[in-house]
Amino acid sequence: TILYSSGCLTPCDVIYSHHVIEHVYDPISFVRGMRRILRPGGLAVIGTENHHNSWVIYRRVRSWLKGRRRPEFQTSDHHTYYFSDRSLGYLLKREGFEILKSLVYTHSLEEKLKNARFRSIFSKMFFYVLHYADVLTGRGNRLLVWCKKPI
């Protein structure tokens, strides 16, 4: 939450940004703005899609087989950037943040199956293979990074 008082930006103790950074046109300015409004020692939590997982590898191979240079985005066609734990961590460190924790995860199978629709038994089997590939490799499709502004 950004607080305003008397027309001036009041420093924040915590900033939580969930599925925002992949949509901004200038992620460097976005991160700099977060750092600027955080108090020294303030915490920023950033959540986004993780681009290093089995689903993306599958989409990349499928796109190459269809003659496309780039795979389509995972959940949206209006994302401007892809991130992995490594690339987001690099950006945050470069802009002066200290990384406290980085978590790559995937939603539970039960949660994914709630909205899943399968065309055939083969598509369902493939869904299970990709899910368990993410679980076993620890490379899920979601990413959370906790970082702080140095004191």
Image: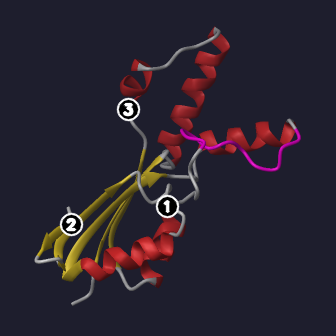
Residue at (43% x, 76% y) in the render: 92
> Separation of disc 1 and disc 2 at Cα?
17 Å
| Mark 3 element type | loop
Mark 1 belongs to which amino acid? Answer: Val
Q: Which residues are magenta?
A: 67-77
Q: Position of residue 145 (x, y in %)?
A: 36, 63
Of labels 1 and 3, the one closer to you: 1
Nearest to N terminus: mark 3 or mark 2 = 2
> Separation of disc 3 and disc 2 at Cα?
32 Å
Residue at (41% x, 55% y) in the render: 20
Mark 2 belongs to which amino acid? Answer: Ile
Residue 27 is left or right of residue 18, and the answer is right
- Compared to residue 133, the image places residue 22 above or below, namely below
Nearest to N terminus: mark 1 or mark 3 = 1
By secondary structure, the bulk of the magenta-drawn segment is best described as loop
Q: Position of residue 74 (x, y in %)?
A: 58, 41
Q: Tell which of 21 and 84 is nearer to you.
A: 21
**In the rendered structure, are the residues bearing label 3 and label 2 in contact, judged by CB atoms less than 8 Å apart?**
no
Residue 124: image tag: none
Q: Tell which of 54 and 47 is nearer to you.
A: 47
Mark 3 belongs to which amino acid? Answer: Ser
Q: Which residue is mark 1?
A: 24
Residue 105 is left or right of residue 132, and the answer is left
Callout 2 crowding tier (Cα within 10 Å): few <14, some 14–19, many ≥20: few
Q: Which residue is mark 2?
A: 2
| Mark 1 element type | loop
Q: Residue furthest front?
A: 7
| Mark 2 element type | loop
Q: Quadrant of residue 144?
A: bottom left
> Separation of disc 1 and disc 3 at Cα?
28 Å
